[in-house]
Image (cartoon, rainbow, N blue to C red):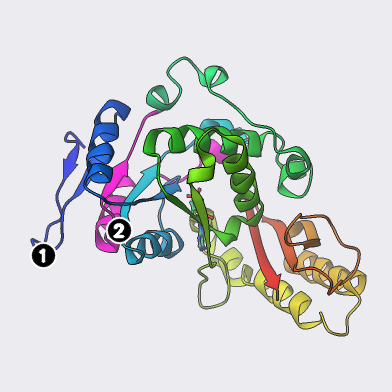
Amino acid sequence: MNSNLYFAPSASILPMVIFKKIQDIQPYLSAQKAAGRGIGFVPTMGALHAGHRSLVEKSCAEGLFTVASIFINPTQFNDKEDLAKYPVTTEADIAMLIEAGCDALFLPGVEEMYPGGSDTVQTYDFGYLETVLEGAQRPGHFKGVGQVVGRLLDIVRPGRIFMGQKDYQQCMVIKSLLQQMPGGDKVEMVMCPIVREADGLAMSSRNRRLTEPQRAIAGTIYQCLVSIQGKKGNGNFAVVKKECEDLLSDKGFIPEYVALANADTLALLDDYNDSAPMVALIAARLGNVRLIDNILLT
Ligand code: AMP
């Protein structure tokens, strides 16, 4: 792409403006705010699918001037191979964002985000959240997520940030980030429902790396979550957890965790406990693709 401007092919759709530089997007967004528009922000790493699209559509439906970002943030990848293989589909992403009604796209390079190197950009401490489940399996991941989202929020300064429940623990990290960062109290995080394929597989940019046979069984994770939810009334979580781990292993997954937690604190639960909202979470590897999913037990 040579130009910073990309206009929709159809005259009936308003153009989406693409910015690569902070010095260009900031005055543009300030002008929108001065004109009385609220800003909705959807940060992504690209390789967009209907899950991402739902976040953009939600922001637009709330009448917000909607800004998406695409930035594959190196500081949140604990696995270098995962970073190297992360899909890049920028042209298709742009087309999808325009169709979804997105108003502006921020598409920075690493230099723009971390001009003095990532060590010079503020990080935050998420305490317990960095030590459990995704935090335990992916050391440093949430430090990187907090760092990049903090930086993006400083640049975009939205009133609302739209995040997917698909990354439940990440939503909790962003809530904590908003409590910690200056001006974070002026931003509301909106957690949006998980968009799934017909067989229940949570949409993910990494799904496109699944082989056909892997894809055919990938919906098993969702089946496990549904069975954990279904046995809430009369079940023993230790038994259901073992059934899920066995089923996943039999199908060829390597389960990393099958967990039940307090949905507000993410404190792990040994058994169902109706006194607080609960969330069940699963992470499992299928070949070299790592899949995560969760379900609220309401
Ligand atoms: P990513 O590009 O993977 O960093 O995701 C960007 C945003 O899209 C995050 O807030 C994700 O939680 C959200 N997201 C990813 N997959 C889905 C999905 N299947 N349904 C809803 N939101 C999603």
Q: In which quarter of the image is the C terminus?
A: bottom right
Q: Which residue is drawn at 11% across and 65% down?
A: 12
Q: Image height check: is 109 above or below 165?
A: above
Q: Is 104 within the magenta?
A: yes
Q: Where is residue 89 in the image (x, y as percent from the top left)?
A: 35, 48
Q: Position of residue 154 (x, y in %)?
A: 44, 33
The Cα atoms of the two marked residues, 1 and 2, are separated by: 16 Å
Amino acid type of the residue that numbered disc 2 sits on in the rendered structure: Met
Q: Quadrant of residue 179?
A: top right
Q: Earlier in the sequence, mark 1 or mark 2?
A: 1
Amino acid type of the residue that numbered disc 1 sits on in the rendered structure: Ser
Q: In which quarter of the image is the N terminus?
A: top left
Q: What span is in magenta?
A: 81-109
Q: Residue at x 41, y 65 (%)?
A: 54
Q: Name the residue under label 2.
A: 96
Question: Element at badge 1?
Answer: loop
Q: Position of residue 100 (x, y in %)?
A: 30, 62
